[in-house]
Image (cartoon, grey):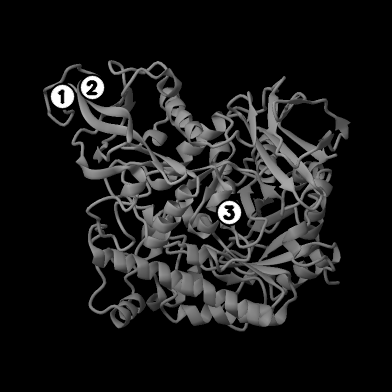
Amino acid sequence: MMNKRAKPWYKSSFRRSLTDMHIPDWDGRFLSEFEPQNYVEMLELAHVDTAMIYATSCLGIAYWPTKVGHMHKGIQGRDTLGELIEGCHGKGMNVIVYYNFWSKWAYDEHPEWRVVSEKGEGTAEYLWDKGRYGVCCFNTPYRSFMISQIEELCERYEFEGMWIDMIFWPYTVCYCSGCRKRYHQEIGGDMPRVVDWQDPGWVRFQRKREEWLAEFTGEITAVIKARKPDATVGHQCSAWSVGWKAGMSGAAFQQSDYTSGDFYGDALHQSFTCKAFYHLTENKPFEYMTSRCPDLTDHTTNKPKELLRAHMYACMANQGGFLFIDAIDPVGTLDQHVYATMGELYKEVEAYETYMNHDALFCQDVAIYINFESEIPLYEGEKALIARATQAAKSLIEANIPYGVVTKKNLHELSRFQVVILPNVGWMDEEEVTAFKKYVEQGGGLYASKRTSLWNKDGIEQADFQLADLFGVSYAGETEEQVTYMAPAAADGKIFSTYSRKYPATIQGSQMLVTAAAGVQTVANITLPFVNPKIIGKFASAISNPPGIQTDWPAIVQNNYGQGKVVYAAGDLEGVPHEGQRAIFTNLIRSLASKPFYFESDAPKSVEITLFYDQSAERYLIYMLNFQAELPNIPVEGIQVKIRMDDDMEPGKLLWVPQNVSIDYQIVEGHLVFTAPRLETFHLLVLEKF
């Protein structure tokens, strides 16, 4: 029977699953024991409400009687996909059909379709675990083959959505005949071979790669929507963090009804990713996927239950939909223990579902801004943009500052945030420049560092920062030294704590040489080491490079612009992982805020608090997550939280749910103040209006 849930399905889905089936068919034992009924029973045991089911794998072998391509020999002609869809619908589950862009079968059958690297290698030659993975290029006839299979799936089956995996350039630039021909037709000449971000020709080529990928994902979406108007379409989005080689762009993200991807990082990585996906997604909620095993290379080792619980609640605390990934045994069986464990965890989630509203407003004061174009290695040894931005997020979490991660998609929403951070965002276009100027002019606070806005999106270095008038400084060069310091311009314990001109804060990297405009306040100056570390054999200290040369070059300045304020840092302050530099950074962020943050807390570093306002129920949702590096968590007692009470807020009951226990609070100087119950892993507190 068909699932009769309200559409769109993702609005009420909280417990999702995917079972990987990347199984070849060269051995008669493979999938010989696969039983769709048992598969559905395992999902039911796990309390799953949405099942993502394989139509093909990265091997390109079909699990249905396809008219094009190759059907898996082990299922002996059975329509296992159809049986699984029927079984899941019969249990009231949503079904998302999984299709993989990679196809080792097509790669082997049609060598002329292959992605070809700069060295002339196919993916089976250069990807990890050589010989396993074959990827064909969508600028070859493989495109039509793939579209034909997708059309066949849409015409043959009823489902709630389709999800396309691995749809990005496979960690290389493709030089296949199809790409070369298309490049010649659209740009002219031969495709460039040298990666050079100072070369406008190379940059133009990269923009084409991004354009081609977004166009292809858009075509797939259009094909599915034409045949299944009510079905959702999702594309694998985890490649956003791979860097420029994947070719991801904002336009590619827009081809998905909801942003989705699989990730395997720690608490910080998940916090950052969830907040980026929250603002990137076209419709809420986004989907966060992770495996039940440490990573997908380890088939029999399971993550501890405590870690799976932390991943699950971290997703929930950012209003996302959680999906766990399992992997089927080659013979087609599943480990019941995995599904029983997930059933216990998902049963916990069910108790919270009546309080969840994916459309609730995320209360965030500070936004970290990133763009896809700046995710490039301009200089050897420097961190990529997302790595720098993630370090900034860590500082904000540890300082209990409510933060989000935004992109160009959110430029029209900047006024929602008190402060926007530009962590060395080197490449900007006119739309971004205009938006940031307007934001500050109308009262926003802006922090920017190092090379922010020094290039346009065509890769052309500008004579000055495009945001120079905002920063209050002009570009004059860069230190040759790769170990530098920031020394407070005056004794100021408020920003620099114990750092002084004699003992300034270390920056592991160069700093920009800038001249300040009249009226701009210099907060810190650049100090250089006694000797440039590049000089071999000459040093002031054998192991370190101590500060020795004070300069008048500004390291940090503050500028008033319109009704707002700007702090510019000449070095990558927000990327330094040490406590002292983190404190300087967060002190600067606090100095840019025009009013108290949504909340304050004395929660320890392992605890992150997120706050949402549910307009439909007129209540605040307060999430508290304890996600420690070593699990199980050590419980945390006595966390004090202060929620800012705006003028229209008359607080009523503060409930700890689903326990339905009332929490005492006080109103102190415009804040609702309470002490949280003992926190093991997760709390949801609901603050109702009076």
Left or right: 200, with 340 as reference point: left
Residue 149, x across and y down, in percent: 59, 79
Of callouts 1 and 2, the N-terminal one = 1
Residue tagged by mark 3? Answer: 279
Residue 611, x across and y down, in percent: 68, 40
Neighbor class of circle 3 (other Cα within 10 Å; few <14, some 14-19, many 20+) is many
The amino acid type, in three-letter code, at marker 2 is Asn
Of the two numbered discs 2 and 3 in the rendering, the one whose residue sits closer to the viewer: 3
Residue 14 vs residue 371, the one in the foreground: 371
Residue 327 vs residue 370, the one in the foreground: 370
At 18% across and 36% down in the image, what residue appears? 480
Left or right: 348, with 602 as reference point: right
Residue 218 vs residue 149, the one in the foreground: 218
Which corner quadrant holds the C terminus?
top right
Residue 542, x across and y down, in percent: 20, 17
Relative to 79, residue 321 above or below: above
The amino acid type, in three-letter code, at marker 3 is His
Residue tagged by mark 1? Answer: 531
- Can you tell which quarter of the image residue 30 is in? bottom right
Left or right: 563, with 229 as reference point: left
- Please report contact status of discs 1 and 2: CB closer than 8 Å, yes or no: yes
Relative to 540, residue 416 above or below: below
Of callouts 1 and 3, the N-terminal one = 3
Left or right: 70, with 172 as reference point: right
Relative to 126, residue 623 above or below: above
Residue tagged by mark 2? Answer: 545
Which corner quadrant holds the N terminus?
bottom right
Distance between mark 1 and mark 2 Cα atoms: 7 Å
- Please report contact status of discs 1 and 3: CB closer than 8 Å, yes or no: no
